[in-house]
Amino acid sequence: MAKQSIFGRIAQLTRANINALIDQAEDPEKMLDQMVRDYTSSIADAESAIAETIGNLRLLEQDHAEDVQAATEWGGKALAASRKADEYRASGGTGTATDADKFDALAKVALQRQIQSENEAKSAEPQIASQNEVVNKLKTGLNSMKEKLEQLKSKRSELVARSKLAAAQTQVADAIKSVDILDPTSEVSRFEDKIRREEAKVLGANELAASSLDAQFNDLEDLGEQTEIEARLAALKSGGLASNTAGQQDPAEITVTTSAYNPS
């Protein structure tokens, strides 16, 4: 029963589709680790069962060989006893008939033992053949399991490597994403915009300052014109006083006099 059980386990494991199991697993790495442990344990059990089966088979084969050898030996003994009986009968001496019968009886016993050994050897042959078939299947299944185990280990190593690579790629992607979020070029661009606004502000201030200077110069021009008006008014008044003291002056002269104060 134990042999059949381990044989069933070997058959089940050798038929397992590793790729399908990996695809269905929620955590392929853990599943592969468990499968590696299961296969390793099953291989150890299979090796033990196969070793026991082979041991039993070898015992059967040894018993069969001993039975065959015993049958041959008993056959030889029967032949020797029969010849001895024939010799006694051929001699014709006193008591030879009794000795002949005795050796014939021994020959019969030897023949009986020969038949018994032959029957035992014959009955063991089907069992030996069956055990040989079982051992061959177990060996084939064991080799298949070992191949599957190597495949599992290879898959696991590949999966672990791919997992580490994926983790590294994810880390790089996250780093790139964080760089994109804190893009230094965007910071430089904002700083440049700030500088441009400051420069524009300076330009505006300069323009405003220039406008103020123009207004001041305009005020100066207005002040100069007002001063000239005041001077001319004073001149007019001075000329009027002089005409009162020296007599009436010719209007043409007044015109000439006032024109002398014209800056143009």
Image (tube, grey):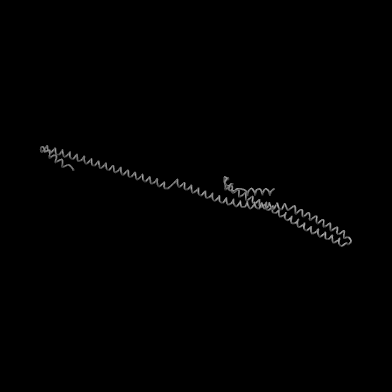
Q: Count numbered badges in the picture.
A: 0
Q: Residue furthest front?
A: 90
Tell me the quadrant of the picture where the C terminus can be found.
Answer: top left
Residue 168 vs residue 208, the one in the foreground: 168
Left or right: 145 in relation to 119: left
Return the residue nearer the eye: 85 or 188: 85
Residue 159 pos. (x, y %) = 56, 50
Image coordinates of residue 174 in percent, x first then y, are 48, 47
Tell me which corner region of the image, top left, top right, bottom left or bottom right, holds residue 229.
top left
| Position of 77 relative to 193 (above/below) | below
Residue 117 at x, y percent in the picture: 77, 55
Q: Residue furthest toward the left?
A: 247
| In-image side of 177 versus 80 (left or right) | left
Quadrant of residue 213 within the rendered picture:
top left
Q: Nearer the viewer, residue 76 or 62?
A: 76
* Residue 211 at x, y percent in the picture: 29, 42
In the rendered structure, the answer to whether residue 114 lies left or right of residue 132 reads right
